Amino acid sequence: MKKRLFKHYSKRDYKAFIYLMPWLIGLLVLQIYPIVSSLYYSFTDYRIGGTPVWVGLQNYIRLFTEDSEFTKALAVTLRYTVTTVPLKLALALAIAMFLNRNIKGINLIRTVYYIPSLFGGSVAISLLWRVMFQDNGVINAFLGVFGMDPISWLGDKRYALNVICLLEIWQFGSSMVMFLAALKQVPSSLYEAASIDGAGKFTKFRKITFPQITPIIFFTLIMQLITALQAYTSAQVITNGGPLKSTYLLGMKLYAEGFSYFRMGYASAISWIMFLIILIITLFLFATSKKWVHYEDEGDF
């Protein structure tokens, strides 16, 4: 029986399996096992170094009925996402259209615009951002040139989250590159035919450019939503969640519960709520994509 099971595999197949073993082990140990174990821990009262105690849905019920800090963090995260994602994609598309031209030095210009995305997510840039927006920072010094009073960007809850959002929007380079690649694939014959018909720039964008690049817009939208909902570094470094929890993101709440208070079961419940939020939004986007995402094989063009 054993010989029958393995006799159709050649030495080449076994070699391929050996080469795949490190990846398979990494997948099982570093991804699948943590996912499954976190789901189990989310239904337990588990602290690091202790023994998990099954509590059922108690962690989830507590999050939505007793933990006001969680609901506050969830609201801040949703506001952060709704603010950053549309503005980031709009800016990336606008810059990509500007760079989609054959002018002297265009490659250098494209590189310059992409640089913020190489460094924007680092702790060093977040620290620099905090220094810039301090009461005696560069931004207030610039405003002072025009006789304006300094603004407490990081100490006023009206402005603090906007500063964090601005850092995220500034990192538009990766989306810009994808949009630029998509714009390069739009057939020039479509624009020529539209020009013959007397179409203006706005009409060309609405009827040709936007429909042709909707698959890339759809993909980028999903990826940026996932990134925004999991944001942590910038808010932690720049404001540490303050003032008055106005920049306290869900990722910070998860980290605090797991690694400051060592309530890993409670933190696991938060992580699965984050996963469900991402899943629901993603499924909604896929369900509605048929109405606005166009593919070449559909025969729309």
Image (spheres, grey):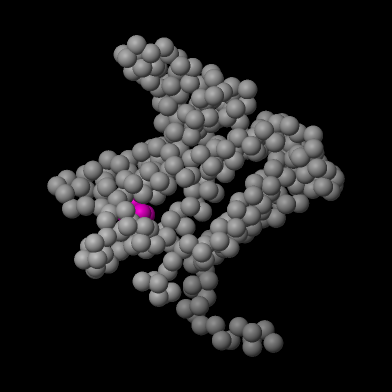
The quarter of the rendered structure image containing the N terminus is bottom right
Quadrant in which residue 125 is drawn = top left
On whether residue 45 falls in the magenta region, the answer is no
Q: Which residue is at the front of the view, 186 or 263?
A: 186
Q: Where is residue 296 in the image (x, y as percent from the top left)?
A: 39, 71
Taking the spot 47% from the left edge, 45% from the top edge, the residue there is 86
Q: Which residue is at the front of the view, 38 or 161?
A: 161
Q: Which residue is at the front of the view, 104 or 42?
A: 104
Q: Give the range drawn in magenta.
A: 176-180
Q: Position of residue 122 (x, y in %)?
A: 44, 35
Q: Where is residue 141 in the image (x, y as percent from the top left)?
A: 35, 15
Taking the spot 32% from the left edge, 57% from the top edge, the residue there is 203
Quadrant in which residue 55 is drawn = top right
| Relative to 154, 252 lies left or right | right
| Relative to 99, 233 lies left or right | right
Taking the spot 45% from the left edge, 53% from the top edge, the residue there is 220
Q: Vertically, is 64 above or below 153?
A: below
Q: Can residue 151 be seen in this view?
A: yes
Taking the spot 42% from the left edge, 47% from the top edge, the residue there is 89
